[in-house]
Amino acid sequence: MTGSNRWLAFVAFQKPGERRYFDRAKDQVLKVPESTDQPTLPEIVPFTKEEQLNWRREFAERIEPGNPLKEKLLHSLCTPSPLHEFSSCLRLEPAAQNSWYRFLSQKVRAGIEDWAKKNGLGPEVQLEHEAAVDSAENERRKLYSVLDKIPVNLLLDLTVPLRWSVQGKEQE
């Protein structure tokens, strides 16, 4: 199981009626409907939204007093879409965004390590933060940086191929 798949199994919110398990023999995460027989495998319980909000709050509180980013991040956590708003604030501050990713990686890694120990799983289950994931994040940041400079009226004229829309839905 790749590090990014494992990462998502713990970080992405579960769909209603779905449970996640780790199949050590196949080295993969299984998504199983609650209505079916549950396997006798270690269950992965993703981090809750509250846990993830607390991590963001903890990160923001660590920023030095007087830094406007600290107030922006703390305010973002009080909005109707706190996870999205928090990310939007960080996109404008690449250095802070990199610090956030390191902070988040430490939190997720610690949670996965704790889960692995509780389930009698060895070190091979530990999160490996792959260079490919970092590279994809860097590319995403560059893209957002470019998109942030384009006026909204021009962004609204962009076309998106239907194939991309359909393939994106199938991968969720």
Image (spheres, grey):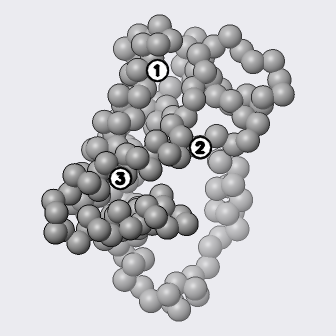
Of the residues shown, which amino acid type is indicated by label 3?
Answer: Arg
Give the label, 2 or 3, closer to the camera. Answer: 3
Q: Quadrant of residue 86 in the image?
A: bottom left
| Residue at the (53%, 92%) spot, across then down | 153
The location of residue 81, given as percent across then percent down, is 53, 64
Above or below, 141 relative to 156 = above
Secondary structure under tag 3 reads helix
The location of residue 158, given as percent across then percent down, is 57, 82
Above or below, 118 relative to 58 = above
Q: Quadrant of residue 106 in the image?
A: top left
Of the residues shown, which amino acid type is indicated by label 2?
Answer: Phe
N-terminal label among 3 and 1: 3
- For residue 13, which numbered disc appears in the image? 2
Judging by the rendered image, the residue that carries numbered circle 3 is 57
Dot 3 and dot 1 residues touching (CB under 8 Å):
no
Q: Is residue 92 left or right of residue 154?
A: left
